[in-house]
């Protein structure tokens, strides 16, 4: 029963993340770079910091964790957060050229597979005595492979969409639709975004051990990863403010109330995926396979829900029934990939 609860919590977080772009549509009179960094203050700084505080037992301080003997893990966690930040930037571009459904599917699918595999592999380079490669069991590999198969099927649906629609129909669904360009960006985004889980792997010991509830143990590491990602995004967004002369966005006091509210909502929905991941893993401790695959499961469910939003937003409008059928098969395979490893 605990496993079902854990997977449901992760699924709720995935649904929230897939919905985080909806509030952004309500932001008024701000350029992309301005609203992106403001929502990032909530998504990558404020909310992860508050979440990390939940991992601190009574009588202790979060800053007690940032000690000299943990410095290597701390800096590696932040470093991979910086790399993940590059993935976050290109992730947005992938949806610009492919749409919410297809862009998230390819980027998050790549992120799911690589994020799961890269963590133990890189840990083995620095800490071979911990035998991190032992976590990549047969069941884990099967889970990753099935997830990638699901992503590939959705990618086929995207290719079918690109070849079957006229340029006018493509632009009607996704204004800047460009499948080859979007595919390349989405693959890069997925590779760099996989660094998030690598950061979590390096930071998994940054907690108070048995004094910290299992549901909250990854939250300090999550904060450090998002801190690194915030640095990357802030540098890029402020560069764009300078380049596009959009510093004046922050002086538009008439829209601050509205925009701050929807930036907060977007940031909260985005952070919910990793808050839910931490809570969900607290219920999966009896299954080492699902613990290792939890990040992959989260990304797979993100893809499922992003395609639901893609259908709602009519990004697949005008496609043939065959294309829609292939899309649905891909979604079903991804759902199966979330549960299959438990039965191997």
Image (cartoon, grey):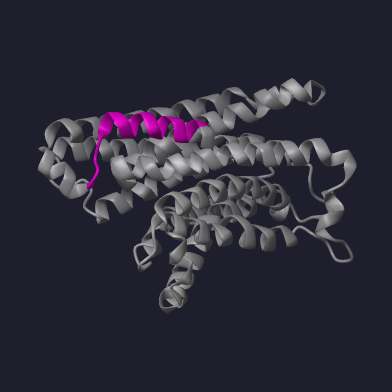
Q: Provide the major secondary structure of the magenta segment.
A: helix
Which quadrant: the C terminus?
top right
Task: Please report the bounds of the magenta region as a residue range.
Answer: 174-191
Residue 36 at least partly seen: yes
Coordinates of residue 192 in the picture (x, y in percent): 53, 34
300 relative to 260, above or below: above
Residue 53 lies in what quarter of the image? bottom right
**Could you tell me which residue is drawn at 16 percent across and 35 percent down?**
322
Residue 291 at least partly seen: no
Quick check: is 30 in the magenta stretch? no
Residue 148 or 258: which is nearer the viewer?
Answer: 258
**Is residue 68 toward the left or the right of residue 244 in the image?**
right
The tally of labels here is 0
Coordinates of residue 19 in the picture (x, y in percent): 40, 58
Residue 343 or 248: which is nearer the viewer?
Answer: 248
Quick check: is 185 in the magenta stretch? yes
Coordinates of residue 93 in the picture (x, y in percent): 38, 42
Residue 282 or 253: which is nearer the viewer?
Answer: 253
**Is residue 210 toward the left or the right of residue 177 in the image?**
right
**Could you tell me which residue is drawn at 25 percent across and 35 percent down?**
178
Coordinates of residue 235 in the picture (x, y in percent): 56, 47
192 relative to 260, above or below: above
271 relative to 78, above or below: below
**Could you tell me which residue is drawn at 38 percent across and 50 percent down?**
305
**Is residue 41 toward the left or the right of residue 224 in the image?**
left
**Is residue 178 toward the left or the right of residue 81 in the image?**
left
């Amino acid at each position: 029963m605990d496993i079902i609860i854990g997977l449901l919590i992760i699924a709720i977080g995935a649904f929230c993340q897939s919905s985080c772009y909806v509030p952004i549509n309500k932001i008024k009179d701000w350029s992309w770079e301005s609203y992106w960094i403001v929502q990032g203050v909530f998504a990558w700084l404020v909310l992860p910091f508050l979440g990390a505080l939940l991992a601190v037992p009574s009588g202790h301080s979060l800053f007690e964790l940032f000690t000299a003997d943990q410095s290597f893990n701390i800096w590696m966690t932040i470093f991979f957060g910086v790399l993940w930040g590059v993935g976050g930037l290109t992730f947005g571009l992938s949806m610009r050229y492919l749409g919410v459904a297809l862009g998230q599917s390819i980027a998050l699918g790549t992120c799911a597979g690589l994020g799961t595999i890269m963590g133990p592999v890189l840990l083995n380079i620095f800490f071979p005595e911990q035998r991190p490669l032992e976590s990549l069991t047969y069941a884990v590999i099967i889970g990753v492979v099935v997830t990638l198969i699901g992503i590939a099927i959705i990618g086929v649906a995207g290719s079918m969409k690109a070849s079957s629609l006229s340029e006018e129909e493509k632009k009607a669904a996704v204004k800047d639709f460009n499948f080859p360009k979007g595919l390349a960006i989405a693959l890069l985004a997925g590779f760099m975004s996989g660094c998030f889980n690598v950061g979590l792997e390096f930071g998994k010991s940054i907690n108070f051990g048995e004094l910290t509830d299992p549901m909250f143990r990854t939250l300090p590491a999550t904060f450090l990863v998002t801190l690194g990602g915030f640095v990357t995004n802030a540098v890029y967004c402020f560069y764009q403010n300078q380049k596009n002369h959009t510093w004046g966005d922050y002086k538009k006091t008439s829209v601050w109330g509205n925009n701050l509210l929807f930036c907060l909502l977007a940031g909260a929905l985005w952070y919910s995926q990793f808050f839910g991941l931490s809570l969900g893993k607290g219920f999966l401790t009896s299954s080492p396979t699902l613990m290792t695959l939890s990040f992959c499961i989260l990304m797979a469910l993100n893809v499922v829900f992003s395609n639901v939003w893609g259908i709602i937003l009519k990004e697949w409008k005008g496609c043939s029934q065959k294309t829609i059928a292939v899309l649905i098969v891909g979604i079903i395979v991804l759902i199966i990939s979330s549960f299959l490893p438990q039965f191997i």
